[in-house]
Amino acid sequence: MVVLAEQLRALGRLDLSSIIDILLVALIFYLLLRVFQGTQAIQLLRGIILLVLAILLLSSLLKLRAFSWLVRTSVPALLIAIPVIFQPELRRALERLGRTQFLFGRLRGEEVFQQVIEDIVMACEALSERRHGALIVLERTTGLQDFIDTGSAIDSGVSSELLQTIFFPNTALHDGAVVIRGDRVVAARVVLPLAQHLPVHGHLGTRHRAALGISEQTDAVAIVVSEETGTISIAHNGRMIRRLGRERLRNVLRTFYDRGALRSKAPVWWDKLKARFRR
């Protein structure tokens, strides 16, 4: 009861400036999360936050004088180290600040993404018939920017013709993976990590091992078209589903891909507001 009474008194002392102060702090944290969204550095940032909170809790509860002194003297070094550690992410953030879609993203309709899936299915079917090898990675909630930086930037809308052109034999971009983020082909000729643990059944080539490797390290969905047999496979969560036909491929993509990347990255309230003005 005493704690509740103190909390009520604290709420009663809130004025307009205090509310603005709280909102500004929340906005800064939101912008920081947006900066690191789409990169693997988000896991490192979470680890740093948890470590700092644990240190503060220990030093305040247990009254550890020597440990508190060590923490206080280490803070300046930490402030210098953070820009060095997150230098690539900070550089990309400055580039994104000039874009009008940095805060709110783009409104992505369900029809758009159904068309994305259909284009991917059509491309895989055509590549399979011609025995053209392909590796297509669909980004979900775990960012793939570190891998994207190893390839060639494209930033184009997804289309069956584009994917077939990229993986046409002997073209400059056919070797490596294509990464799709939302409704955009963001890069080609991307280098992926190879799987550490291979399934016991059958011999797997480099494309299949790369597909399993990226699915082991992230929640991405990787589609492989075999150059030798034309077989279409999907790797997800370190496992591979092989010998997929057109309908089964479409259903698997709707099951896996729709749960993550097909959702709009814009805040829900912003989506609702823009939808109201579109009526």
Image (cartoon, rainbow, N blue to C red):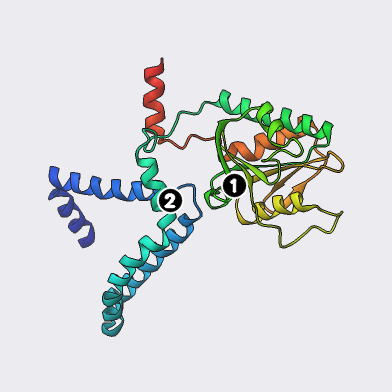
Q: Which residue occupies 23% across, 57% down?
A: 4
Q: Quadrant of residue 189?
A: top right
Quadrant assignment for the N terminus: bottom left
Q: Position of residue 53 (x, y in %)?
A: 35, 66
Circle 2 residue: 36
Tag on residue 151?
A: 1
Q: Position of residue 231 (x, y in %)?
A: 83, 40
Left or right of 199 in this view: 252: left
Instruction: Mark yes or no: residue 183 visible.
Output: no
Q: Position of residue 136 (x, y in %)?
A: 67, 41
Left or right of 142 in this view: 83: left
Q: CA distance from mark 1 to mark 2?
A: 20 Å
Amino acid at pointer 1: Gly
Q: Position of residue 275 (x, y in %)?
A: 41, 22
Q: Quadrant of residue 130?
A: top right
Question: Pointers 1 and 2 in contact (CB under 8 A)?
Answer: no
Name the mark nearer the viewer: 1 or 2.
Answer: 1
Query: 162 and 8: which one is in front?
Result: 162
Q: Is residue 44 above or below residue 170?
A: below
Instruction: Mark yes or no: residue 82 visible.
Output: yes
Amino acid at pointer 2: Phe
Q: Which residue occupies 33% across, 51% down?
A: 29
Query: 264 and 126: which one is in front?
Result: 126
Q: Which residue occupies 24% across, 45% down?
A: 23
Query: How many residues crowd around disc 2 within 10 Å: few (fewer than 14), some, or many (20 or more)?
Result: many
Query: How many residues crowd around disc 1 within 10 Å: few (fewer than 14), some, or many (20 or more)?
Result: many
Q: Is residue 146 above or below residue 187?
A: below
For mark 2, give the secondary structure.
helix
